[in-house]
Image: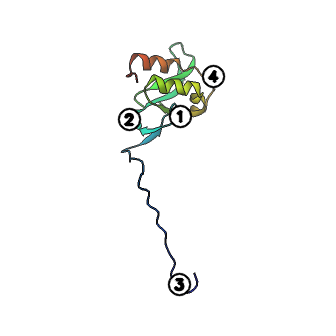
C-alpha cells in the first residue's frame, strides 16, 4: 500500500474439530479420523494356509505398509464395499480380507 499501513485480516474459526492426543489415522472404511490406538492396523500378509491376504496386525508391529480400520463389522463392510484394502495397502485389489473378518467376529467388540 502506498503511504498507508498494511492491514492484516485474521480469521478465527469458532467450531474447530476437537484436537486428538497422539497419532491420528483415517479409517479406510468410514473415512473418519481417530486416534491410532482406537483403530485396528491391517497389512498385506498370509492367511492360515499361506496364501496372500489382508491380515490384522493388532500389535501394529508387522513390517510393511499398513492401513487402519475401526474394529467394527460396519467399517470392515464399508472397506470391502469400497475396495479400500487393495488401494490403501497398494497391493492386489482382489486380495482376500477374510482373516480380518474372522478377527473382528471372534476378538473385537461389535459396533
Give the vertical position of 45 relative to 12 (above or below): above
Mark 1 nearby-residue class (10 Å; few <14, some 14–19, many ≥20): few
CB contact under 8 Å: marks 2 and 4: no
- Disc 3 vs disc 1: which is toward the camera? 3
Where's residue 9, x and y in %? 49, 69
- Disc 3 vs disc 4: which is toward the camera? 3
Q: Which mark is residue 37?
A: 2
CB contact under 8 Å: marks 3 and 4: no
Secondary structure found at label 2: helix
- Disc 4 vs disc 1: which is toward the camera? 4
Secondary structure found at label 3: loop
Q: Does the image show residue 61? A: no
Q: Which residue is mark 3?
A: 4
Q: Nearer the viewer, residue 78 or 35?
A: 78
Mark 2 nearby-residue class (10 Å; few <14, some 14–19, many ≥20): some
Of the residues under marks 3 and 2, which one precedes in the sequence?
3
Report the Cα–Cα distance between label 2 and label 4. Answer: 28 Å
Instruction: Name the quarter where the C terminus is drawn.
Output: top left
Q: Looking at the image, which residue is at 50% across and 14% down?
A: 48
- Disc 1 vs disc 2: which is toward the camera? 2
Q: Which residue is mark 1?
A: 65
Of the residues under marks 3 and 1, which one precedes in the sequence?
3
Q: Which residue is mark 4?
A: 94
Mark 4 nearby-residue class (10 Å; few <14, some 14–19, many ≥20): few
Q: Looking at the image, which residue is at 49% across and 18% down?
A: 99
Secondary structure found at label 4: loop
Kindly give the residue lying farthest to the front in the view shown. Answer: 14
Secondary structure found at label 1: loop
Give the vertical position of 95 relative to 23 (above or below): above
Amino acid at each position: 500500500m502506498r503511504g498507508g499501513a498494511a492491514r492484516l485480516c485474521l480469521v478465527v474459526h469458532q467450531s474447530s474439530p476437537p484436537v486428538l492426543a497422539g497419532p491420528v489415522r483415517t479409517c479406510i472404511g468410514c473415512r473418519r479420523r481417530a486416534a491410532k490406538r482406537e483403530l485396528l492396523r491391517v497389512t498385506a500378509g498370509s492367511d492360515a494356509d499361506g496364501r496372500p491376504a489382508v491380515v490384522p496386525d493388532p500389535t501394529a508391529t508387522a513390517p510393511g505398509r499398513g492401513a487402519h480400520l475401526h474394529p467394527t463389522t460396519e467399517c470392515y463392510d464399508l472397506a470391502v464395499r469400497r475396495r479400500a484394502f487393495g488401494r490403501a495397502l497398494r497391493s492386489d485389489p482382489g486380495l482376500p480380507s477374510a482373516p480380518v473378518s474372522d478377527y473382528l467376529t471372534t476378538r473385537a467388540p461389535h459396533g
